[in-house]
Amino acid sequence: MVGKKVFPYLEKSVSRHGQVRFYVRKPDQPRIRVHAEFDTPEFLVEYGRAIAGETKPATRKAKGETGAPAASLRGLVEAYFRSPEFLSLSTSSKSKRRFSLERFCALKNKQGHIYGDLPYCALLPRHIRAARDELAATPGAANDLVKTLRQLFTFAIATDRADSNPAKDVPYFPPVRADGIPAWTDADVAAYEARHPTGTMARLALVLLTETGQRLSDIYRLGPPMVRDGSLMFVQAKNRARKPVPLVLPITDAMREALAATIHGERTFLITEYGRPFASPAAFGNWFRDRCREAGLTDRSAHGLRKHFSAKLAESGASDREIMAMTGHRTSKEVDRYTR
C-alpha cells in the first residue's frame, strides 16, 4: 500500500537527496522502476505493465563499460574487464591495468582518431610505440602500458578474437635504475632508529620490515589473527589468487620487544594516527616514506629493506633455499638479484 490506494508489490524509496522513486518488486524477481509521476494515468499504465511482466528490469553496466562495438579496441578492453583472467587479479593489479587501458583508449592517433573507437585488429606495433614514447618522461608508466597491452592481446588470442599480439614486438624502456630500488645499509637503519625510538609506530614498522623481509602488500596487513604457536602464518598477497605462497615466519625477540612496547591494532599491528589499519599498501608506503625523510633518508623506501633483509641472510651464511623460504621468492635468480 502506498498512500490511500493499494498497489501490490509497489515499493517507495527516498534517496538521501530527497528524491522519491517507485519500484515494483515481485517475489524472487528483480525490481522494476516506475518512472511516471505517482497516481497519474501514465503511472497506472507503467505499473500495470510491470505487474504483468511486460517491462524488463534495467540492467546496470559494469564499471567502465560504455557499450562499445565488440570490434573496437574499447569493446575488446571491456570484454577483458569481464574475463576470468582480469577478475582473478588482485585489487591493486586490476586498478593498475584498468588505468593503463582506459588511458590508452582515450589517446588520439596522428589523424585525431581516438584509439578506443578504432578496430583493435588494426592496431600495429608502431601505434603502441608512439603511445609508449609519449610517456617517455615516466618510463615506469610507459612500460606498464606496453605490458598491459601485451596481456590484453594475450587474452584476445586465447579467446579467438585476434591472431597476433602487436604489443609483443614493442620493447620496454630500460629501467631508470639498472639495479632497481636501492637497498638499505646498516648506516641507514641506524639513522632511522635514532630518529624513531622503540614504542613508536614508525619503529614498529621498521622492525616488521627488517625481521620478516616482506613486501608492503604483506607488512601493512600483518596482525594478531595471523599469530599461531609463536609464528606468523599467512599467504603472501602477490599472486595470491593464481600462485599462492604460504609462509610461516618466526616471531623474533626484536619483534616481541617492539610489539610489547607499542600500542598496536587488533586486526593489524600497524595502525594510523586514528587507530585504524592502513587503507592500502600505497597508503602505508607513503606514510613510511615520510618517516624515512624525517630520518634524513630521502632516497629510501620500504622495498629497499626487503633487499637489506635478503642480503643480511646471505651474509649470515643462509642458502638460497633458506632465503626463499623466508622471502617467498620462487627462484634463486630472484634471490641473487636481491643479494647481489
Image (cartoon, rainbow, N blue to C red):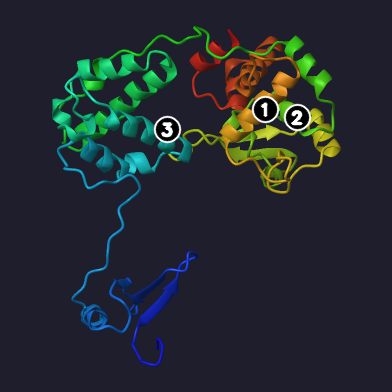
Residue contact between numbered discs 2 and 1, judged by CB atoms under 8 Å: yes
Q: Which numbered dot is residue 96?
A: 3
Q: Which residue is mark 2?
A: 202
The three-letter amino acid code for the residue at tag 3 is Lys
Q: Secondary structure at mark 1?
A: helix
Q: Position of residue 181 (x, y in %)?
A: 56, 14
Against 197, residue 248 (above or below) is below
Residue at the spot x=39%, y=23% of the render?
Answer: 144
254 relative position to 211: left or right = right
> Distance between the Cα atoms at labels 2 and 1?
7 Å
Total labels: the figure holds 3
Residue at the spot x=84%, y=26% of the render?
Answer: 197
201 relative position to 21: left or right = right
The three-letter amino acid code for the residue at tag 1 is Phe
Q: Position of residue 111 (x, y in %)?
A: 16, 22
Q: Which numbered dot is residue 11?
A: none
- For disc 1, the neighbor class at 10 Å (few under 14, some 14 to 19, many from 20) is many
Q: Which numbered dot is residue 288?
A: 1
> Distance between the Cα atoms at labels 1 and 3?
21 Å
Mark 1 or mark 3: name the one nearer the start of the chain.
Answer: 3
Against 123, residue 315 (above or below) is above
Mark 2 or mark 1: name the one nearer the start of the chain.
Answer: 2
Mark 3 or mark 2: name the one nearer the start of the chain.
Answer: 3
- For disc 3, the neighbor class at 10 Å (few under 14, some 14 to 19, many from 20) is some
- For disc 2, the neighbor class at 10 Å (few under 14, some 14 to 19, many from 20) is many
Image quadrant holding the N terminus, namely bottom left
